[in-house]
Amino acid sequence: AGPPCGFADFVSCKIIRGRPSRLCIPGLQGPAITAVTLERTGGYAQKGSYVLAPDKKPKEIDLVFAGQTTGKAIYDISGDELRFCFTQDNGERPTEFKGNPAKTQVFATFKREMDPAKVKAYKDAFEKAHGSSSAATRSANNLRQIGIGIHNYAVQHGHLPPAAIYSKDGKPLLSWRVLILPFIEQDALARHFHMDEPWDSEHNKTLAQMVIPTYAPVAGTDGVKEKNFTYYRVFTGPGTLFEGTKKITFADIPDGAANTILAVEADEPVIWTKPDELPYDPQKPLPKLGGLFKGSFNLLRADGGVQFVKPGFDEALFRLGVTRNDGKVIDLSKLNK
């Protein structure tokens, strides 16, 4: 069951073709990429994002799962009713609100639920199944999307992104966050960057003002209010996953991806395009972490998993997680003492 947000608050769902489905598209407002959940009876679920084109006639929406557009749809909102028509298997976009089995075209009608008791029941059921929508959970979801982006970058390029794009003389120009833009549904923005110029060049600094929802500080935290800043940063230095211009692959993580830290919520935010990360030296104090949640923080492992770490965590174990090749057998799930 989808949560009661936007037009997920429905009491009826008519599917012309296929099994009954429930669709959660929070809000359907503006062109921003937002979370979407498509669940079918039988327990099968897909989770991804969507992109709107409300100026088209009929209005268009693209569903994006696993970084790929897998559903080209049209939609229309009238009062408390949402009409939604899409083609399965990434076929041609429908031109009318009509089911067509020959084209695997699905037409659904959703109606907003107005009964407060039922709305609460939908929300409680969703949060029980998927976790609450707390700030920490939303930030963890951002890190998961970053993890997917880094993994997809590695699939395409054969290695993880470096911590920065470097000039010919070794000067860091732009952050790794710019490099993975195409893999977090921001390909159009990525094409506007001058990759041979620093982040604060006359051209690139205007793009640094853009707000990327995946990177921005989530609401309801102790973080800064400027949305073009980010707390999601990586450790750099010998033995980490980000060693200068070295092209590190997943094969270069003998300690295991589940035991190696990919990114964290730092104590201090930076402008998201700026190549400013967390230098790690085993002989020096750890860089400060936890600027969003008063010392607690989420960390992203190299296997794509995310966990919440509280103050007083096991620092020795954490340090072993920062390095990828120390040969020690560890379990990062035991960080919280």
Image (cartoon, rainbow, N blue to C red):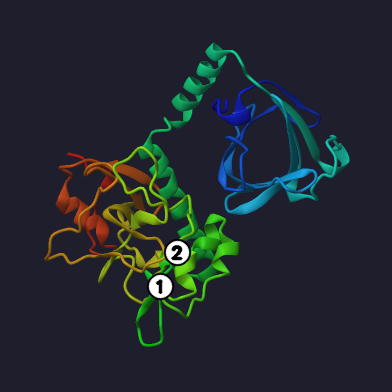
Residue 78 in the image: state x and y as whole percent.
Answer: 74, 29
The front one of 324 and 245 is 245
**Could you tell me how far apart the alpha carbons at marks 1 and 2 are, in whole angstroms?**
8 Å
Residue 312 in the image: state x and y as whole percent.
Answer: 15, 42
- Amino acid on which disc 1 is placed: Asp
Numbered mark located on residue 165 in the image = none
Residue 76 in the image: state x and y as whole percent.
Answer: 75, 35
Which image quadrant: the C terminus? Answer: top left
Q: Residues within 10 Å of mark 1 (few under 14, many from 20)?
A: some
Determine the secondary structure under disc 2.
loop
The front one of 217 and 160 is 217
Q: Quadrant of residue 1?
A: top right
Q: Residues within 10 Å of mark 2 (few under 14, many from 20)?
A: some
Left or right of residue 245, residue 293 in this image:
left
Report if residue 179 is visible in the image: no
Name the residue rendered at 19%, 51% in the picture: 317
Q: Quadrant of residue 5?
A: top right
The front one of 205 and 129 is 205
Relative to 134, residue 272 above or below: below
Query: Residue tagged by mark 2?
Result: 208
Query: Residue tagged by mark 1?
Result: 200
- Asked whether the beta carbons under mark 1 and mark 2 sit within 8 Å of each other, the answer is yes
Name the residue rendered at 41%, 87% in the picture: 168
Residue 328 in the image: state x and y as whole percent.
Answer: 22, 58
Report if residue 254 is visible in the image: yes
Left or right of residue 18, residue 142 in this image:
left
Relative to 53, residue 195 above or below: below
- Amino acid on which disc 2 is placed: Ala
Name the residue rendered at 37%, 45% in the picture: 306
The front one of 235 and 74 is 74
